Amino acid sequence: MPVLTSGQQERKSKQRKIRNSEYYDMEGTFDRLYAESKNDKIFNHLMEIIESEENIKLAYRTIKKNTGSDTSGVDKRTIADLAKLSEEAYVRLIRKQFSNYHPRPVRRVEIPKPNGKTRPLGIPTIVDRIVQQCILQVIEPICEAKFSENSNGFRPNRSAETAIAQCMRLIQVQHLYHVVDLDIKGFFDNISHTKLIRQIWALGIRDKKLLCIIKEMLKAPVVLPNGEKTYPARGTPQGGILSPLLANIVLNELDWWIASQWEQMPTRTKFKTRNNAQGTEIKSHAYRALRRSRLKELHAVRYADDFKIFCASHEDAVRAYKATELWLKDRLGLEISPDKSKVVNLKRQYSDFLGFKLKVRKKGKKYVVRSHMSDKAYKKAHGKVSEEVKKLAHSSDDNAQFMQLQKYNAVVAGLHEYYCISTEVSHDFSRLAFSINKQLRNRLKGDLSKKGQLRNGFIKEKYGASRQMRFLHGRPVVPLGYVQPKNAQHKRKSINKYTVKGREQIHKNLAIDTATMLWLMRNPVKGRTIEYADNRISLYAAQYGKCAVTGILMDSHDIHCHHKVPVRNGGSDEYANLILVSKAVHILIHASSEPTIEKYLKSLNLDDKQIEKLNKLRTMAEMPPIIL
């Protein structure tokens, strides 16, 4: 059976990764690695798991949905080239890489930044990306067991929201109003390879063949845009699959060093602790005793190489700044950028973090957190939405305008989704909307109106109550100024990708996947009508992203929109005539060949009720029912 490919996906979904590992029956292996790492086991034979057929297939399934899967490296090959191979040939190709690994050169591209500078991005070849993904899948559970709770970037079930939630708790609950903003100078370019390998060894990953492969990856030559080839002695390329995990391994030592100064400081008396609703351990009695000592209270929150240290006084913050600067230099060989690093008093100034700016204001006898979009984030959002409005106004025809409107709506909904955890988000977006709405009115003249129809689905559910709703030729325009604020949520301790109970919590909390919804809005099916594209999105919301036959959640690449009455028989693109099913089910609805039917029935393992639903759709499509 050939390995199948798919289109790009805008953002990785943590739940999708879990479903992938379930599909290839790797869950038990990853759970075992996590549990053994928690118990400080030493791992000497990881290559057996990394080179296993199931792990290699899982790597392909994960990589093919990445945004960059269609981006080529120096060899000009993409995921589509691997898709042409049979399963056996694909597995054989990847295993051959592990036998004597020498990575191909990494293609360097320069990504423009808002400040006019560029960020270097390294793009490995597609085969090297698969190799890196194979390694990542196996060593991630081992590392996750050893990582600090204060680290939030590029980790399962953690995000910018959990980082902001931690910041707000430290300010609001623990009254730490003095913040050390630290910026590491050229972090990804200055990681010491020798130190990194030692840190991986210290985590218990001691398979020497694996460590040699990682060393080779770090030393892979880089082809610059001008064609010149360089050989890095330090650093890890941004853009590599393994790079975010390696960055977290490097700074994990910093996390635990800061924690040892206060959070993990041992006390002579063993104090009682309790867990809050999120499962976080509350050490209020121990902290009360520590505050009576001369120790300086400090807590860190980190997202990749962007981190903050919260202190109780300005004096403590200055000391923490100096101590951290010296520690980074001595232990990791990294330097602080003095221009971008500073001590901030939150009662007087804002502190920027992950596109937000935080401050405290007095309310009665206490101080409360006040957060906005940062100035840089506001400017970037304004430019992005303005560009979408310009494209909307210059659409060549009605169909092109609809496609562009979908993209505009996706951009606005995406901004709302990210910044809604800001306390002053309504104020920020009202200001943004005042400017953008002027552009909409001026550029689209009399095409905007208050009259139009809202279908059941994402836009009606989220924006239907807004008086700011406008319609462009009867189609809804997501109101930029209407955003529903929410509190930033901590990650529950019980949620864990690598335990059975933790995965149950993830599946339990699963609602409509907004990332997939926005992907569908940005990627309408070419050659189909506007009505078809609109109904496809409405159906995704109505079916909660599940296949109508199997009831299983679908990834964006797996969503097929089926006409109940075929188009050739006069079937329309109306909502009532469409239904979303998975790719395998769609093939089965139209299959006439007995081997094909047997193959997909075996893989889907449908029960009687599901067979009944399938046969109903087959009958409407003028296909004979399947009789088992």
Image (cartoon, rainbow, N blue to C red):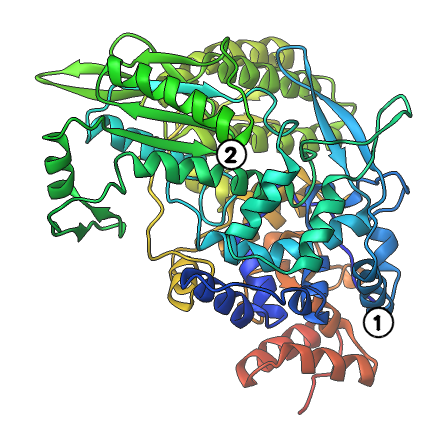
Q: Name the residue type under label 1.
A: Glu
- Secondary structure under tag 2 reads loop
Residue at x 26%, y 39% (from the top left corner):
263
Mark sitting earlier along the chain (1/2): 1
Using residue 566 as the reference point, say whether residue 199 is left or right of it.
left
CB under 8 Å between discs 1 and 2: no
- Secondary structure under tag 1 reads helix
Percent x, y of residue 563:
69, 61
Percent x, y of residue 571:
72, 59
Residue placed furthest toward the bottom: 628
Q: Which of these two is toward me, 245 or 264?
A: 264
Residue identified by numbered label 1: 88
Residue at x 26%, y 18% (from the top left corner):
316
Residue 259's mark? none
Residue at x 84%, y 25% (from the top left corner):
224
Q: Can residue 251 be seen at all in this image of the molecule? A: yes
Residue at x 49%, y 36% (from the top left corner):
251
Determine the image quadrant of residue 500. Answer: bottom left
In the picture shown, does residue 85 fall above or below 259?
below
Q: Which of these two is toward me, 444 or 215?
A: 215
Tell me how many marks there are. Answer: 2
Q: Name the residue type under label 2.
A: Ala
Residue identified by numbered label 2: 304
In the picture shown, does residue 76 fall above or below 296?
below
Percent x, y of residue 590:
77, 72
Q: Label 1: how many residues lie within 10 Å, few (<14), some (14-19) or many (20+)? A: few
Residue placed furthest toward the front: 330
In the picture shown, does residue 165 fall above or below 592?
above
Q: Can residue 475 be seen at all in this image of the molecule? A: no
